[in-house]
């Protein structure tokens, strides 16, 4: 065999080897993620009714409106989704950063969180922070300055946006207490004139406590969006999955699916009181 034939034969063998490896590599690289992605681990804030809370019948899992939404999505995706309790909210975020949790069902958008997870657009729920008052309240609320001179209450370490927090510190009288339950009790008993808190969790606690003498003002203090997110380190974080999830979140938002789930889970939370 002359040199040119040797080179030609070597070239053909080399190309065949390359094509063989190219055909093998997708199967090799895709096998583990495809198998793993038949089962997704999802978590979220475990102290956030009606969205999420620990299942009293199995405290290793979370139930609530967000968990129900995940099960609807699981059926459409053809996978199983385990909505798991992994610890407090800080722990949930750390487990997601490490990739031990595939997705968070309900996170507000912040720039630091972009370092370890992707947000699925659109948001599946807009949350509303409201001014709560007794039904016989003599004041109205349309803007922040309407609260000047009134005594308010909220839960310690809550933030309602940098601008409002700064204004409240300079101009408003707001006591802080350890729990939403305590804040609602103070409002119900007339010890404060208003409470500032997120609307849906407030409604859930009011239903569970059978507090009927309070209302929310029509104008929101702030509005925040709840997103589904996927960990950067999840083996399931592919363009295909992100595309499917975004399509589902768009469909659920258009169909207003979360409204019915939230309403149902407010009552579920109320009935779970011991």
Image: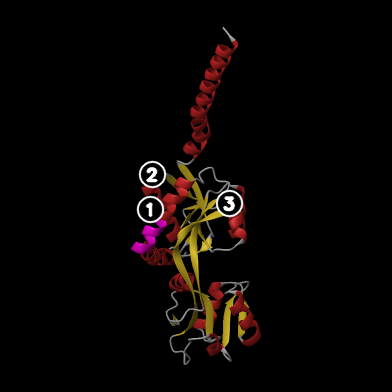
Q: Nearer the viewer, residue 217 or 153?
A: 217
User: Dividing the picture into quarters, in which one does residue 214 lie?
Assistant: bottom left
Q: What residue is rendered at 62% in x and 60% in y?
A: 112
Residue 261 - label: none
Query: Mark 2 or mark 3, which has the lower sequence index?
Result: 2
The main secondary structure of the magenta stretch is helix
Do the residues bearing badges 3 and 1 touch, measured as CB atoms within 8 Å? Answer: no
The answer to whether one can see residue 106 in this image is yes
Q: Where does label 1 land, which residue?
A: 72
Residue tagged 2: 78
x 53%, y 23%: residue:
15
- The residues colored magenta run 248-256
Q: Position of residue 158 (x, y in %)?
A: 60, 72
| Image quarter of the N terminus | top right
Q: Residue at x 58, y 63 (%)?
A: 110
Residue matched to label 3: 96
Residue 250 included in the magenta stretch of the image: yes
* Observer-nearest of 16 and 250: 16
Question: What percent of the width, then of the height, locates residue 146?
Answer: 53, 89
């Amino acid at each position: 065999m002359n040199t040119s034939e040797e080179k030609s034969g070597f070239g053909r063998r080399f190309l065949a080897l390359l094509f063989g490896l190219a055909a093998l590599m997708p199967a090799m690289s895709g096998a583990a993620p495809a198998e793993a992605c038949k089962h997704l681990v999802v978590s979220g804030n475990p102290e956030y009714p009606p969205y999420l809370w620990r299942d009293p019948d199995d405290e290793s899992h979370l139930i609530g409106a967000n968990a129900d939404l995940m099960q609807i999505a699981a059926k459409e995706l053809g996978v199983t989704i385990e909505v798991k309790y992994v610890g407090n909210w800080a722990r949930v975020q750390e487990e997601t950063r490490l990739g031990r949790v595939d997705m968070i069902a309900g996170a507000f958008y912040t720039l630091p969180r972009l370092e370890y997870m992707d947000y699925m657009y659109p948001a599946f729920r807009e949350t509303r922070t409201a001014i709560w008052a007794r039904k016989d309240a003599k004041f109205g609320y349309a803007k922040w300055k309407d609260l000047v001179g009134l005594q308010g209450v909220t839960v310690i370490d809550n933030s309602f946006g940098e601008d409002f927090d700064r204004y409240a510190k300079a101009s408003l009288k707001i006591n802080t207490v350890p729990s939403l339950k305590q804040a609602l009790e103070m409002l119900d008993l007339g010890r404060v004139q208003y409470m500032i808190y997120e609307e849906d969790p407030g409604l859930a606690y009011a239903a569970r406590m059978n507090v009927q003498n309070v209302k929310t003002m029509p104008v929101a203090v702030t509005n925040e969006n709840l997103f589904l997110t996927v960990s950067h380190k999840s083996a399931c974080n592919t363009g295909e999955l992100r595309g499917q999830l975004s399509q589902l979140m768009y469909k659920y938002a258009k169909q207003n699916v979360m409204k019915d789930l939230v309403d149902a889970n407010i009552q579920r939370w109320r009935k779970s009181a011991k």
